[in-house]
Image (cartoon, rainbow, N blue to C red):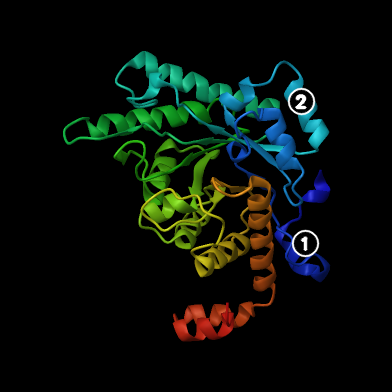
């Protein structure tokens, strides 16, 4: 599948492929799992969309839908490489926390499932496991010992990273939902955790909607992770800020998304772009195609930006000069 992947330098140096994403492109499978649609058929529906070049599944649910050898055969059939598994500990067992649960047995079970995800990623040469610790947090004042649950979280992260140093593990932060306060709620929290875990294969995944929810500017948050060498995953979507809207890419924040793509490209981001969008009233194939087309359009636009002039305007912190360099939308 090497023909579906191009380095940033290859794209930049060849005008014939200008606008072609220098990253693999994957998308949220549950957007295609409508009533009566199996996981296998959802994958086939995704694979038919031109421009999709990778597959990312939730673990364990999506993987458990397949019998022995079935997923292997489907990957061969579609030609899609698996680039990541997204951990989802959504069983009621973990409603009071996973790595931070008050019961030791629950914490150990959460670690076991996350380590199984690492083993599964290695089995399918995915190379990356994304941890979204949905229920690790709190809802009420005095409900928990913040220092204790932070330490439990770090120990959990470290145990997953140590399972297989060849597999990247990243935390996907989110400020709230389903808990009122998530433990890892911002890029700063995520980078602090990565620093404390202190493993080269442990980093961060940024989700654009989650970043807006945290009051961040996603391009700046991504730049911080890139500077630290810790940006392992990007979940691209859009929203208005207060909630996890999961809207079509660049449908609300077009200039921000353009800047994010610029930051990823100039910072040599080498992971997958994963569309974490929720096409509830839209046809999923059409919505996925629109997301791919938007990324291609933004890349083509960046191809026509004079980077020397842009760098000079940024060095001067001259907003008007930046606007002149970028031109009209």
Q: How many marks?
A: 2
Residue that appears at 51% across and 81% down: 322
Q: CA distance from mark 1 to mark 2?
A: 31 Å
Q: Is residue 232 visible?
A: no
When the figure is inspected, residue 162 is found, relative to residue 297, above or below; the finding is above
Secondary structure beneath dot 1 equals helix
Q: Residue furthest top?
A: 105
Of the pair 314 and 183, the residue shown nearer to us: 183
Quick one: label 1 or label 2, which is nearer the N terminus?
A: 1
Residue 300, image x and y in percent? 70, 70
Name the residue tied to disc 2. Answer: 72
Q: Quadrant of the C terminus?
A: bottom right
On the picture, is 10 further left or further right than 296? Answer: right
Nearest to viewer (mark 1 / mark 2): 2
The quarter of the displayed image where residue 290 is located: bottom right
On the picture, is 314 further left or further right than 307? Answer: left
On the picture, is 143 further left or further right than 171? Answer: left
Q: Quadrant of the N terminus?
A: top right
On the picture, is 100 further left or further right than 202? Answer: left
Residue 317, image x and y in percent? 44, 80
Secondary structure beneath dot 2 equals helix
Q: Is residue 184 visible?
A: yes
When the figure is inspected, residue 292 is found, relative to residue 167, above or below; the finding is below
When the figure is inspected, residue 55 is found, relative to residue 328, above or below; the finding is above
Q: Residues within 10 Å of mark 1 (few under 14, many from 20)?
A: few
Name the residue tied to disc 1. Answer: 10
């Amino acid at each position: 599948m090497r023909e579906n992947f191009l380095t940033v330098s290859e794209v930049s140096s060849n005008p014939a492929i200008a606008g072609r994403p220098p990253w693999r492109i994957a998308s949220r499978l549950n957007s295609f799992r409508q009533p009566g649609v199996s996981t296998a058929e959802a994958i086939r529906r995704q694979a038919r969309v031109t421009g999709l070049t990778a597959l990312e599944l939730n673990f364990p649910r999506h993987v458990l839908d397949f019998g022995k050898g079935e997923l292997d055969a489907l990957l061969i059939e579609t030609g899609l490489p698996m680039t990541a598994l997204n951990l989802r500990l959504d069983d009621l067992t973990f409603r009071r926390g996973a790595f931070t649960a008050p019961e030791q047995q629950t914490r150990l079970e959460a670690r076991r499932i996350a380590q199984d995800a690492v083993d599964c990623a290695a089995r399918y040469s995915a190379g990356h496991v994304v941890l979204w610790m949905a229920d690790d947090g709190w809802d009420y004042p005095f409900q928990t010992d913040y220092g204790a649950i932070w330490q439990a979280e770090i120990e959990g992260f470290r145990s997953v990273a140590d399972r297989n140093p060849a597999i990247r593990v990243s935390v996907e932060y989110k400020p709230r939902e389903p808990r009122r306060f998530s433990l890892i709620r911002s890029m700063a929290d995520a980078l602090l955790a990565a620093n404390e875990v202190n493993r080269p294969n442990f980093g961060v995944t940024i989700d654009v909607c989650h970043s807006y929810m945290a009051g961040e500017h996603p391009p700046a948050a991504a730049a911080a992770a890139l500077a630290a060498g810790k940006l392992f995953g990007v979940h691209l979507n859009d929203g208005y800020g207060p909630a996890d809207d999961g809207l079509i890419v660049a449908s609300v924040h077009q200039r921000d998304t353009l800047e994010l793509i610029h930051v990823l490209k100039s910072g040599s981001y080498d992971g997958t772009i994963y569309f974490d969008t929720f096409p509830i009233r839209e046809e999923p194939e059409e919505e996925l195609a629109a997301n791919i087309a938007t990324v291609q359009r933004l890349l083509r636009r960046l191809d026509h930006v004079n980077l020397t002039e842009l760098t000079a305007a940024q060095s001067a912190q001259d907003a008007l000069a930046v606007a002149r360099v970028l031109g009209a939308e």
